[in-house]
Image (spheres, rainbow, N blue to C red):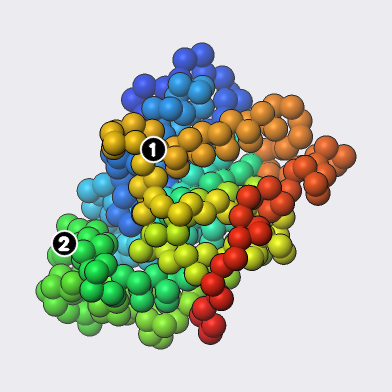
Amino acid sequence: MPDGGECSIDWPCIEPEDMTEDMPICILIPGVAGHSQESYLLQWILELRSLGIRSVVFLNRGAGGQILQTAISYDGLHNVKDLRQIILSIHDKYPNAPLVCGGTSMGGVTLVHYLSSYGNDSLIAAAMIQSAGWCIFESVKSLSKPSNMIFNLYLTMRYKEVIKNNKELFESDRKDMDIKGILKCTTVQEIHTKFVVPNYGYKNVEEYWAKLSPHRQLLNVKIPLLSLNAADDVFSPEHSIPVHLTETNPNIAFVVTAKGGHIGFMEGMNPKQMGYNDCVFFEFIQTIRTAIESGQLNNRGEWVDGLHSESEGSLGSSSGVRNRQYPTWPKGN
């Protein structure tokens, strides 16, 4: 990366048969400190291969056991530029291959910021995200409830994994921070306040949460974007899901299920079988591929003139949730 840092991508060991230069490539973006062996990604990788679609996993700095080269790791925002470099690299190597993206949790947050930042020049044809937190203020408030503290602790642990693996680097380059104290943090609010804010130069944790909240970026998304959330997800409370924005931007759509938790969406008693999220993702990817192959959608996510109507092609008008009554959007966030 231009600043001397390093991130990486993982290609599967076994690629689809009969690969061609224009075979679609799906870039998968995991959550905080996520890597290519996450269970929620392995199902997608295997199924994409069977569909004749290549997949590649974007690993943020420090994720998957990578050793940091600089004290810049992951905050969900600075990594947008890293994602840009990766997408440019893949596009340069396979210029004729349509690129689609799948983002999970914080990976979805980063993906929305990327799509908003680069607009029509994102080089992505379409994207889907699952279980993203839309208003970080509401996410933290939910995670702070006593009944949800186990999830709070787990997320904090994922942040601390990267810090612990690079403890010497942080102690050397960030002498103004108490790294030993940071490794004792037990909540997301603590780790954001004591580590993320000073490490990335935010004024305070409120400024960081306000900038990180991706609902502010949705109106700038220029390509087809589908979001899947569950109403009972403690990381993304139902009242904070900005379904109303589909009225303003026809490029975005929301699917909100009553149950599903955070990246759960089980369809039966066997946790290893495909879940509802997997089915939605594969159907979406197949639909996008058909649209591209038929000439309705180009590789830049633009609908071809005359082949996309407001009544039939608009994601917003076909989301299936438009008439549902949602609680009032949190004010001031």
Crowd around label 1: few <14 · some 14–19 · many ≥20 (10 Å)? some
Crowd around label 2: few <14 · some 14–19 · many ≥20 (10 Å)? some
Pick whichever, 193 or 89, lies toward us.
193
Mark number, residue 198: none
Pick whichever, 1 or 74, lies toward us.
74
Q: Which amino acid does label 2 sit on?
A: Lys
Tell me the quarter of the picture where residue 145 sits: bottom left
Mark number, residue 267: 1
Tell me the quarter of the picture where residue 99 sits: top right
| Image height of 6 relative to 91, above or below | below
Residue drawn at point x = 31 percent, y = 70 percent: 143
Dot 2 lies on which element?
A: helix
* Residue extending farthest top: 18
Tell me the quarter of the picture where residue 195 sits: bottom left
Residue drawn at point x = 53 percent, y = 84 percent: 332
Q: Which amino acid does label 1 sit on?
A: Glu
Side of 29 relative to 315 (left or right) = left
| Image height of 53 relative to 33, above or below | above
Is residue 58 visible in the rendered image? The answer is no
Q: Position of residue 186 (x, y in %)?
A: 18, 72
Q: Nearer the viewer, mark 2 or mark 1?
A: 1
Dot 1 lies on which element?
A: loop
Residue drawn at point x = 32 percent, y = 62 percent: 73
Residue labelled with disc 2: 164
Is residue 332 visible in the rendered image? The answer is yes
| Image height of 203 relative to 253, above or below | below
In 3D space, how far apart are the residues under numbered discs 2 and 1 (Cα atoms)?
37 Å
